[in-house]
Image (cartoon, helix red, strand yellow):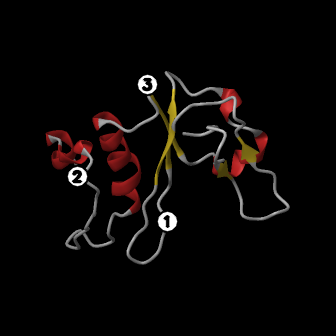
Amino acid sequence: MSGFGLDSLVVGSLDPKRKTLLKGPQSRSWTTFIEAITADGRALTPGIIFKGKDLQAQWFKDEFREFADWNYITSPNGWTDNHIAVEWLEEVYLPQTRPDDDSEARLIILDGHGSHATNKWMATH
């Protein structure tokens, strides 16, 4: 949970000269990150799930323009669900891991989250 007051979550550049957003203890909202890398070390576009109905402009400070192409999503509790899992699969994983040769296979290794075992997830390709 971001802003719990004991630990802080910082999202931004490792460069110490760059500004970083740090949520203060007054905020108690969940933010979930979906991260994946390929076997050759390429990082896929991260998915960021905010708690809320719609994305809000105040969540995106000017300092974060370089992260504008990340996959931003909202959910009622800030967690992933069946719909978000399929959306990430279709919009991030499949396009960014598409092999040059259609005869080549892909392997995705997942945790045990229930959203990875739905009929729609399994049928998406």
Look at 30% across and 42% down and name the residue there: 86
The amino acid type found where label 3 is placed reads Pro
Q: Are marks 1 and 2 in contact (CB under 8 Å)?
A: no
The answer to which of 123 and 82 lies nearer the viewer is: 82
Q: Compared with residue 89, is residue 61 higher up or lower down, i.e. above or below?
A: above
x, y percentage for residue 53?
A: 49, 21
The answer to which of 8 and 14 lies nearer the viewer is: 8
Label 3 or label 2, whichever lies nearer to me, is 3
Q: Residues within 10 Å of mark 3 (few under 14, many from 20)?
A: few
Report, in whole angstroms, how far the alpha carbon at label 3 lies from the one at label 2.
27 Å
x, y percentage for residue 79?
A: 41, 36
The amino acid type found where label 2 is placed reads His
Look at 57% across and 28% down and name the residue there: 55
Q: Sequence order check: which comes first, mark 1 or mark 2?
A: 1
Q: Residues within 10 Å of mark 2 (few under 14, many from 20)?
A: few
Residue assigned mark 1? 43
Q: Compared with residue 94, is residue 75 higher up or lower down, i.e. above or below?
A: above
Look at 55% across and 48% down and name the residue there: 70
Q: Please give the label number shown on residue 125.
A: 2
Name the side, left or right, on which 83 lies relative to 1.
left
Residue assigned mark 3? 76
State the SS at label 2. loop
